[in-house]
Image (cartoon, rainbow, N blue to C red):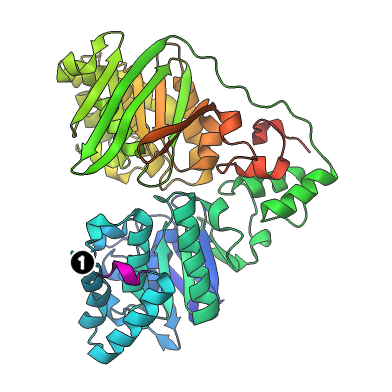
């Protein structure tokens, strides 16, 4: 179904010279059969997205760059062709499908692409009935897109990408904003499309632990221009981008590597390991109190009379399904952008009574897309603006950033930083205010495992008795790595509040991979385990 022959792709500078010393993709050769489910992975910045864009024609048509070799899809050589010439063969769903929707109603969104390709009405009707049945969205056709959950939007985007009979489906981080249940439904749909309907699926995903046991093969983009395709257990040469189950197998020398928790548990039980369960950091003084805090959007009660206390010296994770109220809670604590009832109090008093600038100095918020807070043309300008705004000595923000991300040329444009570096920059800007409460909403979205480990290290460096860190996240593995306490929300209500070892224990629906494998009381982390 898909063949790449001696494919080379390089980004170019405005003067036409290569932007990097070596090509992003260099003499790539691979063949992918019809109906295969392929996971595309590799270190952050290795070229995964570029590979997908080559396969759907966006590179070089929209990205710019130089391409050579051949891209052959279903026997047709489409190298260098415009994206519309790929469109009847290749469907694409990006990381945030809602950002590419062109209609208001589900039905109109699904059929739009086929109409633009000139597919006749009878074929569209036939394909519509088939694809909506496969994706179980027949009852959504008359709904407005903005009324759908994240998982429902993903399925609508998949339907729109396949309505014209496309034979290849490319997806970029389709589960990054979904809870465990929503991600499971999307993966089940993709598996059904490959096994029962012959669609070839290439899925780029950083949360590999969610999908590793479902795919047929692993396509690794190595970062040096090369790629490799083969069985999952054979493709991990190191642990830079490996999920915990693979990292554990590499550490313990398992051959072959296991990709399911069930099989890994059998290997663990053959030679059990001894370890000391993780203990949370002790709580310091109380920094933040929520009293009967509620948020209502029209007829929807998004947060219902919530009472919580947060303490210094701790990282608290707020978890729950899509729509449970995690992001709403964060913004309600921040006190921006929505009307609340109830009280948010700190040692300085009720935050509603404080001037806006004073509140922002006490409670810092890093939203899901950290880059939304970056608006200047260089790191140096961002550093200087942050110091001036926070009334701190010049160099304060730069020093914080260096501790989190290392030395980086201050003349760089913030948009040229990696996602992890952008997050470190926004963290530094917020921390320059000496905020006592730091809020992070889905901070690992788009980060690979190596970047997550680096972020976990950064956050742990920030723990101190007079600071409380609160993060909203679906990412169980990251929460297991960094949190002391886990608050679980459901339909805007707190349903549990536990130390991380109990919240992510093997008997919990939110069990981490290592908890599922070891099936022991408490929580373990990889640095505790030795061969």
Judging by the rendered image, the residue that carries numbered circle 1 is 105
Looking at the image, which residue is at 39% across and 22% down? Answer: 308
Task: Tell whether position 210 is magenta.
Answer: no
User: Callout 1 environment at 10 Å: few (<14), some (14 to 19), or many (20+)?
Assistant: some
Looking at the image, which residue is at 42% across and 81% down? Answer: 167
- Left or right of residue 285, residue 270 in this image: right
Which of the two residues, 381 or 195, is positioned nearer the viewer here? 195
- Left or right of residue 196, residue 20 in this image: left
Quarter holding the C terminus is: top right
Looking at the rendering, the stretch of residues picked out in magenta corresponds to 137-141
- Residue 358, can we see it? yes
Reply above or below: 240 against 293. Answer: below
- Left or right of residue 418, residue 413 in this image: left
Reply above or below: 241 against 32. Answer: above
Q: Position of residue 268 (x, y in %)?
A: 78, 44
Q: Position of residue 300 (x, y in %)?
A: 25, 43
Looking at the image, which residue is at 39% across and 62% down? Answer: 50
Q: Position of residue 370 (x, y in %)?
A: 31, 39
Looking at the image, which residue is at 67% across and 55% down? Answer: 260
Which of the two residues, 495 or 125, is positioned nearer the viewer here? 495
């Amino acid at each position: 179904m898909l063949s790449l022959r001696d494919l080379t792709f390089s980004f170019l500078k405005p003067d036409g010279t290569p932007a990097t010393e070596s090509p992003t993709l260099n003499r790539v050769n691979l063949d992918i059969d019809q109906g295969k489910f392929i996971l595309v992975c590799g270190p952050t910045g290795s070229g995964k997205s570029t590979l997908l864009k080559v396969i759907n024609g966006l590179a070089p048509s929209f990205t710019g760059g130089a391409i050579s070799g051949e891209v052959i899809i279903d026997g047709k050589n489409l190298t260098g062709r415009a994206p519309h010439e790929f469109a009847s063969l290749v469907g694409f769903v990006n990381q945030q499908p809602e950002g590419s929707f062109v209609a208001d109603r589900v039905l109109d969104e699904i059929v739009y692409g086929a109409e633009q390709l000139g597919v006749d009405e009878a074929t569209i009707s036939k394909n519509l009935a088939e694809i909506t049945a496969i994706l179980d969205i027949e009852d959504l056709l008359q709904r407005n897109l903005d009324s759908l959950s994240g998982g429902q939007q993903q399925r609508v985007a998949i339907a729109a990408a396949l309505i014209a009979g496309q034979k290849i489906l490319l997806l970029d981080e389709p589960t990054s904003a979904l809870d465990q249940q929503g991600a499971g439904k999307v993966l089940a749909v993709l598996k059904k499309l490959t096994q029962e309907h012959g669609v070839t699926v290439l899925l780029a995903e950083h949360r590999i632990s969610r999908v590793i046991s479902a795919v047929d093969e692993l396509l690794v983009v190595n970062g040096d221009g090369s790629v490799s395709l083969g069985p999952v257990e054979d493709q991990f040469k190191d642990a830079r981008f490996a999920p915990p189950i693979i990292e554990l197998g590499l550490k313990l020398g398992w051959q072959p590597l296991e990709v399911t928790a069930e099989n890994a548990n059998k290997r663990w039980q053959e030679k059990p390991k001894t370890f000391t369960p993780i203990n949370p950091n002790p709580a310091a003084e109380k920094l933040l109190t929520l009293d009967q805090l509620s948020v209502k959007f029209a007829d929807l009660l998004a947060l219902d009379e919530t009472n919580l206390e947060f303490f210094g010296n701790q990282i608290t994770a707020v978890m729950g399904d899509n729509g449970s109220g995690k992001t709403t809670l964060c913004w309600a604590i921040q006190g921006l952008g929505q009307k609340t009832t109830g009280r948010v109090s700190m040692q300085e008093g009720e935050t509603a009574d404080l001037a806006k600038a004073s509140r922002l100095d006490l409670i810092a918020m890093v939203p899901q897309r950290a880059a939304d807070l970056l608006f200047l043309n260089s790191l140096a300008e961002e550093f200087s603006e942050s110091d001036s705004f926070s009334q701190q000595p010049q160099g304060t923000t730069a020093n914080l950033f260096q501790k989190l991300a290392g030395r980086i040329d201050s003349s760089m444009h913030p948009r040229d930083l990696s996602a992890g570096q952008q997050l470190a920059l926004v963290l530094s800007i917020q921390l320059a205010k000496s905020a006592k409460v730091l809020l992070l909403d889905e901070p690992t979205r788009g980060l690979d495992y190596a970047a997550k480990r680096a972020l976990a290290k950064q956050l742990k460096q920030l723990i101190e008795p007079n600071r409380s860190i609160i993060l909203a996240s679906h990412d169980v593995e990251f929460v297991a790595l960094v949190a002391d306490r886990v608050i679980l929300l459901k339909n805007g209500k707190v349903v549990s509040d536990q130390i991380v070892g109990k919240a992510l224990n093997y008997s919990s629906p939110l069990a981490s991979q290592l908890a599922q494998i070891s099936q022991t009381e408490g929580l373990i982390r990889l640095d505790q385990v030795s061969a």
